[in-house]
Image: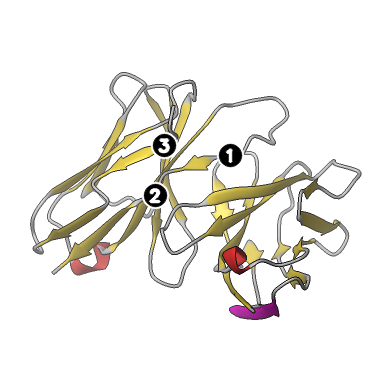
Amino acid sequence: AQKITQTQPGMFVQEKEAVTLDCTYDTSDPSYGLFWYKQPSSGEMIFLIYQGSYDQQNATEGRYSLNFQKARKSANLVISASQLGDSAMYFCAMREDTDKLIFGTGTRLQVFP
Amino acid sequence: DTGVSQDPRHKITKRGQNVTFRCDPISEHNRLYWYRQTLGQGPEFLTYFQNEAQLEKSRLLSDRFSAERPKGSFSTLEIQRTEQGDSAMYLCASSLVSLSGKDGYTFGSGTRLTVV
């Protein structure tokens, strides 16, 4: 079974609009962490935001926020006020007790003027 | 410190040749990870080190692959007798273990391997 599922292969959004990228996860471990990374065409993975399984509040980092619904096992990334530079691949990842990250297949976001 | 450095950025090799990649992590980070990313997929875990100790290896890491971190600083990933299926982006990341768990991993820009 997939541990991390990203069902949107591609998304389009107009500049200055908000967009939500979906991520669902599967774990029986009560302690885990969820991450979102951005991968531009240059290839490096850029850390965006983190949510711990015991965190009571949804994480926010500037224009990025994480809509964490623990019972549904979803951790959707919300990007507000999209910019052209946000065009990239976005990966959701989970860390369980072994400290390695498990990634989803990613969503390609394209921002148009 | 300029982040995680990987060398080379690109490597083209003939099938059957050996290749070696290098990763220089952020100096104060004690953990170093190797991932492989094929086209259209997310990165897949290969192995990781805490200081010089290799703590975990994925089943993806066949006996043709070997990774070292001899002095707990830089790491090398060697692939022997390369096959076309080894063509991928090889990503290195480093982290500093903390109790909060929220510290992200800092990734390098990767080494893109093409086996012809």
Label 2: chain?
A: B
Q: Residue A77 colored magenta?
A: no
Q: What is the x, y in percent for residue A84?
A: 60, 69
Near mark 3 (Cα within 10 A), the count class, few <14, some 14-19 or many ≥20, is many
In the image, what residue occupies the spot 58% across and 64% down? A85
Residue receiving disc 1:
A98
Q: Is residue B65 left or right of residue A27?
A: left
The mark closer to the camera, 3 or 1, is 3
Residue bearing mark 2: B109
Q: How many marks?
A: 3
Left or right of A47? Residue B60 is left
Disc 3 target residue: B4
Answer above or below: position of A39 versus B104: below
Predominant secondary structure in magenta? strand
Q: Are marks 1 and 2 in contact (CB under 8 Å)?
A: no
The magenta span reads: A9-14
Q: CA distance from mark 1 to mark 2?
A: 24 Å
Which amino acid, by three-letter code, is at mark 2?
Ser
In percent of width and height, residue B65 lies at 25, 47
Q: Are marks 3 and 2 on the same chain?
A: yes
Residue B56 in sight in this render:
no
| B21 left or right of B45 in image | left
The crowding category of the residue bearing disc 1, from other C-alpha atoms within 10 Å (few below 14, some 14 to 19, many at least 20), is: few
Where's residue A9, x and y in %?
58, 78
